[in-house]
Amino acid sequence: MTGVEVARTVAGLRSRLDAERAAGKTVGLVPTMGCLHAGHASLIDAATGNDLTVVSLFVNPLQFAPDEDLADYPGDSEADLEVCTLHGADLLFSPSVEEMYPGTGVPEVEVGDLAARYEGASRPTHFGGVATAVSRLFKVVGACRAYFGEKDFQQLAVVRQMVAEHSIPVEVIGCPTVREHDGLALSSRNVYLTAPERGEAPVLYRALQVGAAVVEGGETDPGAVVSLMAEVVGSAATGELDYAAVVDPATFETPTRITGAGVRLLVACRFGRARLIDNMAAVPA
Ligand code: PAF
């Protein structure tokens, strides 16, 4: 097992990667906020298909609202380094806030209508902050393939849209959600769940499964699917549903009818300190 090189400055990382690319090497990037779990590890595994794998670890203050958990966002840099090493990453980019945002630190990337719905409606400044951090990372890392988990499906769509609109030379690759044995999607915020909340949290996955099954069985009314999913999530005494939705996976608009192309099912629910999200594709049989 070889060690992972740690870069803390933009200049250091950039010169290293420019040299690799000049030698014809391909670069894979896994953007993270640390607290790496098996979901992140699967992204690193996918990125190692490139010649050089970079994992970024930056807890981005711009994507947290003042009342959110920035101050105590979970993290353990030793454990993160171990995950990177075990999964074959070559470089860990771990900049300070000043290094990432040497200017005013004000969100600088406009995100459109796509970012105003669902997660964007519940967390109005969130996607502007995400897009700013990811755009900075893409500028620093340069041409690469970047790997994002489908668990944050709307984030993935916002990043894809940003890349297309700004002609950024990055290929964005979405990777499947990694789940616990009972279906709970892995998330750094799962550590906030108390035992009773953890017991009920897989209700999100069950709601998505029920929704996907009725779509597969021929249900074409998005409202009916939403009601079913909300009913399933509602069975969790410790959970408080934020939204259940049926959307077009590209626009995040709700179709009038579900057609053969299929839809994406979304759910968000608060369990005490943890706000959890999940999603699933649903395609008529
Ligand atoms: O998904 C995350 O961990 C973050 O939103 C990201 C993409 C690293 C941007 O800060």
Image (cartoon, rainbow, N blue to C red):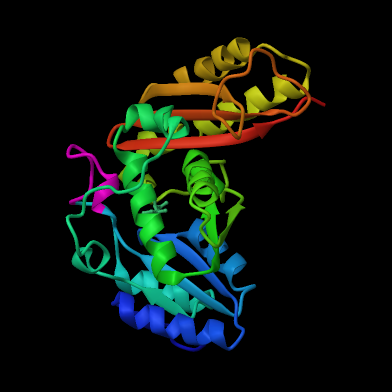
> Which residue shows up at 37% across the image and 41% down it?
110
> Which residue shows up at 47% across the image and 79% down it?
85
Residue 181 vs residue 260, the one in the foreground: 260
Toward the right, the furthest residue is: 285
Q: Which residues are magenta?
A: 61-71
Residue 272 vs residue 170, the one in the foreground: 170
- Is any part of residue 270 visible from this angle? yes
x and y percentages locating residue 18 in the rendered image? 47, 82
x and y percentages locating residue 214 in the rendered image? 71, 19
> Which residue shows up at 40% across the image and 56% down it?
134
Is residue 172 rendered magenta in the image?
Answer: no
Question: Taken as a whole, is the magenta stretch helix, strand or loop?
Answer: loop
In the image, residue 124 above or below residue 227: below
Question: In this figure, what is the number of numbered marks?
Answer: 0
Residue 74 vs residue 24, the one in the foreground: 24
In the image, residue 160 above or below residue 58: above
Image position of 61 (left or right of 150): left
- Is any part of residue 180 visible from this angle? no
Give the position of the C terminus as an image quadrant. Answer: top right
Is residue 68 rendered magenta in the image?
Answer: yes
Residue 257 vs residue 160, the one in the foreground: 160
x and y percentages locating residue 249 in the rendered image? 61, 33
x and y percentages locating residue 2 in the rendered image? 49, 89
In terms of image quadrants, where is residue 36? bottom left
In the image, residue 240 above or below residue 256: below
